[in-house]
Amino acid sequence: MTDPGASATDPVDDYTGAVTPGGPADVRELPRLTIRKLAVSEMSNNAYLLTCRETGRQLLIDAADDAPALLHLVRSGGDGLDAVVTTHQHWDHVRALADVVAATGARTIAGRDDADALPVPVDDAVGQGDTVGVGAVTLDVLHLRGHTPGSIALAYRDADDRAGRTHLFTGDSLFPGGIGNTKQPGQSFDALIEDVTARVFDVYDDDTWFYPGHGDDSTLGAERPHLQEWRDRGW
């Protein structure tokens, strides 16, 4: 949606986040960061390419599947790939990880408690309160326990964005309509709802836009009124 108050020099934001496997990426231009969202695989996994507009350095969130498509996305964004962040260990989010890393030499980043389960060695194991950098851009790491032990989200606020909006990449921990699946062995609804409440909804404003691991995006303001409903239903 275009900001009617934007100046002629501000990036025009017509991003919707609606993407389909085999279709083009949707692109959001922030003053310091370009976000490209691509859907891959029969499970409509989302992959996000972040490009620092000052330096051209790039970071990929979740090399989920279809390495050729992801590598094409990387080439469309700029020269090379600095890092791949894996939001969590589940197989559908790592199917292209080894191929993308082999093709680009990118370093690997994942949650500390999921790192040993990934199909490639993890260069940087991170947790709550850590940061991830790409070029002149820094993102905050949130550890959201419950979907997997080491699930992480990344939060970014563009210092030059007059809207002041936070952008949150949540993996499979938060979706429009609820938190991630916690019905399998080793998962915990109580842990995930508490972390999503305390580390996401209690910290970030309603206009925070979040980008999940599958499907469409949403804002915290759209989801906040339903938190008690999620608690009551247990999923």
Image: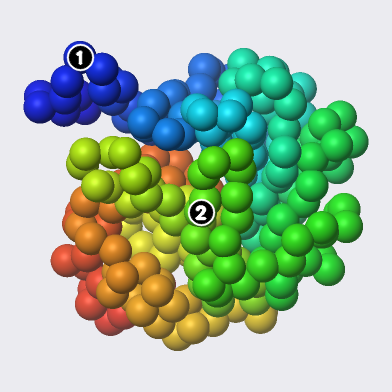
User: In terms of secondary structure, where does tag 1 sit?
Assistant: loop
The kind of residue tagged 2 is: Leu
Query: Looking at the picture, does residue 123 appear above or below residue 75?
Result: below
Q: Locate the C terminus by quadrant.
A: bottom left
Point out the image quarter for the N terminus: top left
Q: Where is residue 96 in the image (x, y as percent from the top left)?
A: 78, 38
> In the shown orientation, is residue 181 left or right of residue 229?
right
> Crowding near pointer 2: few (<14 within 10 Å), some, many (20+)?
some
Checking the image for residue 139, the label placed there is 2
Visible in this render: residue 123?
yes
Which residue position is annotated with label 1?
8
The percent position of residue 56, horizontal first and vertical second, equals: 60, 26
| Image position, residue 24 (x, y; %) | 52, 17
Q: Residues within 10 Å of mark 1 (few under 14, many from 20)?
A: few
For the residues labelled 1 and 2, the Cα–Cα distance comes to: 27 Å
- Residue visible at 26% across and 22% down? 10
Along the line of sight, the residue nearer the viewer: 78 or 119: 78
Q: Which residue lies furthest to the bottom in this view?
A: 190
Labels 1 and 2: the sequence-earlier one: 1
Residue 13 in the figure: left or right of residue 63: left
Q: Is residue 62 left or right of residue 218?
A: right
**Residue at the (39%, 40%) spot, across then down:** 216
Residue 40 at least partly seen: no
Number of residue marks: 2
Q: In this view, does 45 lie above or below 71?
A: below
Q: Which of 55 and 202 is in front in this view?
A: 55
